[in-house]
Image (cartoon, rainbow, N blue to C red):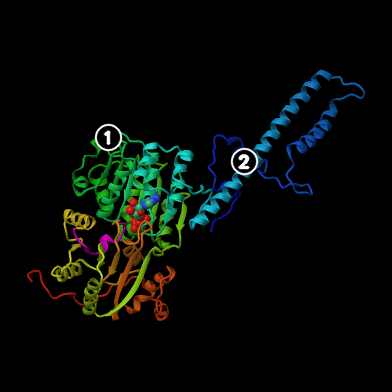
């Protein structure tokens, strides 16, 4: 997929010091001298400095001969002087040539090193002159002059080695390139965009937002803000979460906010109604980018992108799923972006053991769920349903059982939603029933099991939901119930299982392909209990 070109072949994987090699750049540009002349000698070895010197001296002797009168040189002194100058020039040029050869070899070694690292970490890229992935976090200091406080914070957070997406995305963003990145759930994408951001921007003064991170849900925005604060500890960065109050009444001119984390609608509101100025934003991140576009926010995102009008802005898109349509849309807003895929595009994390269970009917699902809890309940567990009504219904059923269950959906207040998340994190609840609001990006330490009580509406919804477990190298389990009504839609999900090495009955993958990728079923009620029961 990588498109080779002269410049990418020469410089891909290298950190190219443009100032230092300005002379060489000029030569490549004019095309005056190919960087790597094909050796004409039969032994095909590039001429060494000694050989070259002799060849050039002969040429000079020929050239100088026109100044010589037979038997006597009329310009003896001048000639001698000129000859000296010429030889100085020759030596200088030879030095330059050998420097070019040396640099070419260095560049080739760099390309090789980068290719080996990419192969080792299953990183696939497309784009020109892509910098090599990081070998370690120490390289942040040796190669990119990273402040010691940041490296200290990384080690305090227990991050010893970069994950594959961090290795490649960090070097790309630090080299000032835009990127769109697709890497499995739980593989550390957040740090991949936070770290370069904190390295590049400086803590500043009031009224000047330097970085914006867009997230599809408030919970994810809150989580990202917290992660950013942890990583920035020790420096006076203003890291702000766009709350409802801030979006409606915030006085952004008097606020110290270097990094702003928001959902799209709140940010758009603040831009239009609170005069939030984003013209000096240097970094814009669209996290869970496919979801952002999918939510019907294309116009809102477009206006946010336009509000971030700094011409040298660096934009990046991150997600575990990147459909072609979104990629095409993203390309329209980015320039010379690098595309990074870790592992296989649009696939589930390999750390999750996935199972599909036929439960027959809605009633069968409730029985299967209770049975599964009775057999083994290994909290924390997330149970996904397809709507807030169904979340409330399932909660009413389970709240009487002998398990600590909680629920989260869009009808709750922001505080109630945050409490539900915090309770699961603190172990106060064991089972959290959730709608799609929790499917994206949420990082709960050690979620052992995700249960898709309602069959997910698409393969990407499935990948994100089950990706709440099996994070940061830990293993996880995902159980998906299906009924007769879901059977026609099994194929897409079964294919995800197959591509991550899980077994499925062959009839599932042999099911006919459906035109629509989305699957929304009108289901029978889960429970006939009411709020008063
Ligand atoms: N280099 C690292 N070493 C160890 N753990 C890490 C490293 N980087 C990130 N983590 C941890 O991995 C977990 C998952 O990271 P993160 O939430 O960024 O995943 P993600 O790729 O954004 O997932 P999703 O696609 O679900 O949003 C977090 O708990 C984070 O602290």
Vertical arrangement, residue 166 with respect to residue 98, above or below: below
Q: Is residue 288 visible?
A: no
Q: Earlier in the sequence, mark 2 or mark 1?
A: 2
Residue farthest to the left?
532
Q: Which secondary structure lies at badge 2?
A: helix
Vertical arrangement, residue 389 with respect to residue 444, above or below: below
> Which residue, given by chain and number where applicable, does mark 2 sit on?
103
The percent coordinates of residue 147 (x first, y second) are 40, 36
The percent coordinates of residue 395 (x first, y second) are 17, 68
Q: Which secondary structure lies at badge 1?
A: loop
Residue at position x 92%, y 23% from top?
71
Residue 397 is left or right of residue 110, and the answer is left
* Numbered range of the magenta stretch: 428-442
CA separation, marks 2 and 1?
45 Å
> Which residue, given by chain and number where applicable, does mark 1 sit on?
206
Neighbor class of circle 1 (other Cα within 10 Å; few <14, some 14-19, many 20+) is: few
């Amino acid at each position: 997929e990588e498109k080779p070109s002269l410049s990418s072949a020469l410089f891909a994987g290298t950190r190219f010091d443009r100032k230092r090699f300005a002379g060489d750049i000029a030569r490549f540009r004019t095309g005056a001298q190919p960087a790597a002349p094909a050796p004409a000698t039969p032994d095909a070895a590039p001429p060494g400095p000694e050989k070259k010197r002799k060849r050039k001296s002969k040429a000079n002797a020929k050239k100088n001969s026109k100044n010589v009168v037979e038997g006597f040189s009329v310009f003896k002194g001048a000639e001698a002087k000129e000859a000296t100058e010429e030889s100085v020039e020759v030596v200088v040029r030879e030095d330059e040539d050998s420097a070019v050869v040396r640099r070419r070899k260095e560049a080739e070694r760099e390309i090789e090193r980068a290719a080996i690292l990419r192969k080792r970490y299953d990183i696939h890229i497309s784009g020109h002159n892509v910098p090599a992935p990081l070998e370690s976090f120490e390289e942040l200091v040796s190669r990119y002059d990273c402040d010691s406080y940041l490296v200290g914070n990384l080690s305090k957070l227990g991050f010893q080695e970069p994950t594959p997406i961090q290795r490649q995305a960090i070097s790309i963003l630090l080299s000032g390139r835009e990127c769109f990145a697709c890497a499995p759930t739980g593989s550390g994408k957040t740090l991949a965009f936070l770290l370069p951001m904190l390295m590049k921007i400086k803590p500043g003064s009031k009224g000047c937002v330097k970085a914006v991170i867009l997230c599809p849900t408030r919970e994810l925005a809150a989580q990202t803000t917290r992660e950013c604060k942890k990583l920035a500890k020790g420096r006076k960065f203003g890291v702000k979460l766009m709350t409802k109050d801030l979006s409606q009444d915030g006085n952004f001119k008097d606020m110290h906010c270097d990094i702003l984390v928001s959902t799209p609608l709140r940010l758009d509101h603040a831009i239009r109604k609170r005069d939030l100025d984003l013209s000096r934003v240097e970094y814009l991140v669209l996290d869970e980018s496919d979801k952002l576009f999918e939510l019907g926010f294309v116009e809102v995102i477009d206006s946010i992108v336009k509000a971030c009008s700094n011409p040298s802005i660096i934009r990046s898109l991150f997600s575990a799923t990147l459909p072609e349509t979104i990629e095409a849309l993203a390309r329209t807003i980015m320039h010379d972006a690098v595309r990074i895929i870790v592992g296989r595009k649009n696939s589930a994390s390999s750390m999750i053991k996935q199972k599909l269970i036929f439960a027959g009917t809605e009633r069968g699902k409730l029985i299967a769920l209770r049975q599964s809890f009775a057999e083994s309940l290994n909290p924390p567990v997330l149970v996904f349903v397809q709507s807030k009504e169904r979340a409330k219904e399932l909660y009413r059923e389970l709240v009487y059982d002998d398990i600590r269950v909680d629920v989260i959906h869009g009808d709750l207040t922001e505080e109630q939603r945050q409490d539900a998340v915090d309770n699961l994190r603190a172990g106060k609840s064991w089972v959290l029933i959730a709608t799609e609001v929790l499917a994206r990006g949420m990082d709960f330490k050690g979620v052992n099991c995700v249960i898709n009580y309602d069959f997910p509406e698409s393969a990407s919804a499935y990948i994100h939901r089950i990706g709440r477990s099996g994070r940061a190298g830990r293993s996880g389990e995902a159980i998906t119930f299906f009924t007769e009504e879901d059977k026609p839609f099994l194929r897409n999900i079964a294919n995800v299982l197959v591509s991550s090495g899980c077994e499925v009955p062959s009839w599932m993958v042999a099911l006919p392909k459906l035109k629509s990728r989305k699957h929304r079923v009108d289901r029978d009620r889960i429970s006939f209990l009411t709020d008063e029961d």
